[in-house]
Amino acid sequence: MRQGCSMTAPRPIRDKSPVRPRRIPRARAQAIFDTLGEANPEPQTELAFVNPYTLLVAVVLSAQATDVGVNKATKRLFEEVQDPAAMLALGVDGLKAHIRTIGLFNAKAENVIRLSAQLLERHGGEVPRDRESLEALPGVGRKTANVVLNEAFGEPTLAVDTHVFRVAHRVGFSRGKTPDAVEQDLLPQVPQQWARAAHHLLILHGRYVCKARTPECWRCAIAPHCGFKPKSAAPGGKC
């Protein structure tokens, strides 16, 4: 039986563990990322995109929405639109017709049109490769910039979404109360060889294993290194 595993069926769990140190031992951090990387050696975003511009649009649309929902909405959109000029030609109403199934689609459509115009005016229609220019675009914050820099340009950034935030707290990487604080706690703890992949490794682990309401600790490869207690049992009480 795995240590800390109860014999009851999984149920929503709130982490009532005492406050943990902000940093974990280097060897433990190495083991966590080695284990996640061994299971998923080439992790990638689950957002569908064609080029850096469509990736940027997809990430802006993904705020408070699922990747699955965004991909459904952008499938036909990205067949028609793959650059800022085409997006401006489509117009805000045309864009809304494609993305109306996504939450906050009115505001998101306005931002996408505005950022497309700004890309043409200031960057020759290309997505900039520096954080300052990205974050100056309408609707683009630090998390979006991190995703684009990582996925499109190979930078070792670490975007903290709800999944990364949760995993970082449960494992013990951070006690930060904001995404920025968690990012700053996490970055120095990521082994160099996993610097670029860490973002996706943590997101995918949080999305499919370390879930918010019922973490599947019974099948978690990094459970021996995790500070989250109590851990949940497998369905049927088998640990």
Image: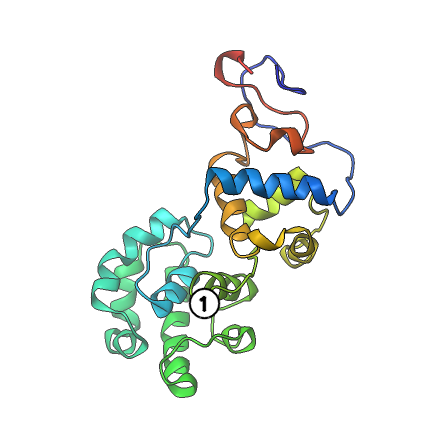
Question: 212 or 23, which is in the foreground?
Answer: 23
Instruction: Determine the image quadrant of residue 80.
Output: bottom left
In the image, what residue occupies the spot 35% across and 53% down? Answer: 70
In this rendered view, identify the residue nearer to me: 215 or 51: 51
**Residue closest to the eye, 220 or 81:** 220
Which residue position holds label 1? 153
Where 109 falls versus 183 (above or below)? below
| 206 horizontally vs 176: left or right | left
In the rendered picture of this protein, how many numbered marks are placed on residues?
A: 1
Q: Quadrant of the C terminus?
A: top right
Q: Is residue 112 left or right of residue 98?
A: right
* Quadrant where the image shows the N terminus: top right
The percent coordinates of residue 135 (x first, y second) are 53, 73
Q: Look at the image and tell me whether residue 106 can be seen.
A: no
Q: Looking at the image, which residue is at 72% across and 45% down?
A: 26
Three-letter amino acid code at the position of disc 1: Phe
User: 67 above or below 137?
Assistant: above
- What is the crowding at mark 1: few (fewer than 14 residues within 10 Å), some, or many (at least 20)? few
Measured from the top left, where is residue 60 in percent x and y? 43, 63
State whether residue 144 is above or below residue 218.
below
- Quadrant of res 83: bottom left
User: Residue sitting at 76 percent across and 47 percent down?
Assistant: 22
Residue 200's spot in the image, x, y percent?
A: 49, 50
Residue drawn at the location 46% of the way across and 45% of the way down = 41
Residue 186 visible in this rendered orientation of the protein:
yes
Displayed quadrant of residue 119: bottom left
